[in-house]
Image: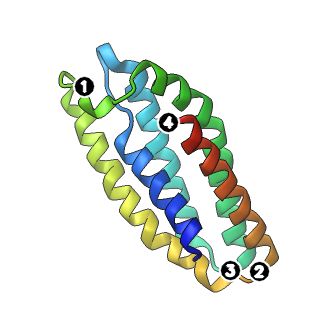
Amino acid sequence: MSARWMAVVIAAGALMAAGCGGGGKYADLQRFQKKMLGAMEAYVADLEKADSAKKVAAAMNAHTDRMEKLAPEAEKLQKRYPNPDALADRPKEMRENEEKMRGMAMRMGGAMMKIMPYMDDPEVRKAQERFVAAMSEFSRKMR
């Protein structure tokens, strides 16, 4: 895995783990947090099942699709709540989901090791480039 790609993956995981959750007062954050957690879980499950370059590329593309779909909502929430972790009154469920996302980010790192044997495949490389571009754009919007 290239250092650049690994940096983007780590940044994406940090963004996912750091941002968003909540109910009641922060219902919008909580809904987004659950969507993000679902996207992470689906990506890990897809990669864990992948046993070919084609399936790895499909898992990466599906995750990129999910992240592109979530990006506009994330950007809007980032403007409304620039630092959701600093919200002292966020509910317990929100904090618990943040912990789940941190754990899932760790699982994602392990699952992504399944990509390594297929890195020379053109489909996987194309999916990787798309993923890196999407996550770079996602990170840019979240600044």
Q: Tell me which amino acid carries mark 2.
A: Asp
Vertically, is 84 above or below 4? above
Q: Tell me which amino acid carries mark 4.
A: Arg
**Cα–Cα gap, marks 3 and 4:** 30 Å
Label 4 Cα neighbours within 10 Å, binned few <14 / some 14-19 / many ≥20: few
Q: Which mark is residue 121?
A: 2
Q: Identify the residue shown where x is 72% and y is 77%.
A: 53
Q: Tell me which amino acid carries mark 3.
A: Met
Local secondary structure at mark 1: loop
Indicate left or right for 51 with 98 as reference: right
Q: Earlier in the sequence, mark 4 or mark 2?
A: 2
Q: Which residue is mark 3?
A: 119
Q: Which mark is residue 87?
A: 1
Tell me if residue 44 can be seen.
no
**Cα–Cα gap, marks 1 and 3:** 41 Å
Vertically, is 21 above or below 42? above
Q: Position of residue 122 (x, y in %)?
A: 81, 76
Q: Earlier in the sequence, mark 1 or mark 3?
A: 1
Q: Which mark is residue 143?
A: 4
Local secondary structure at mark 2: loop
Q: Position of residue 50 (x, y in %)?
A: 62, 73
Q: Earlier in the sequence, mark 2 or mark 1?
A: 1
**Quarter where residue 13 is shown:** bottom left
Task: Residue lying at the far right in this picture: please name it.
Answer: 122
**Quarter where residue 88 is shown:** top left
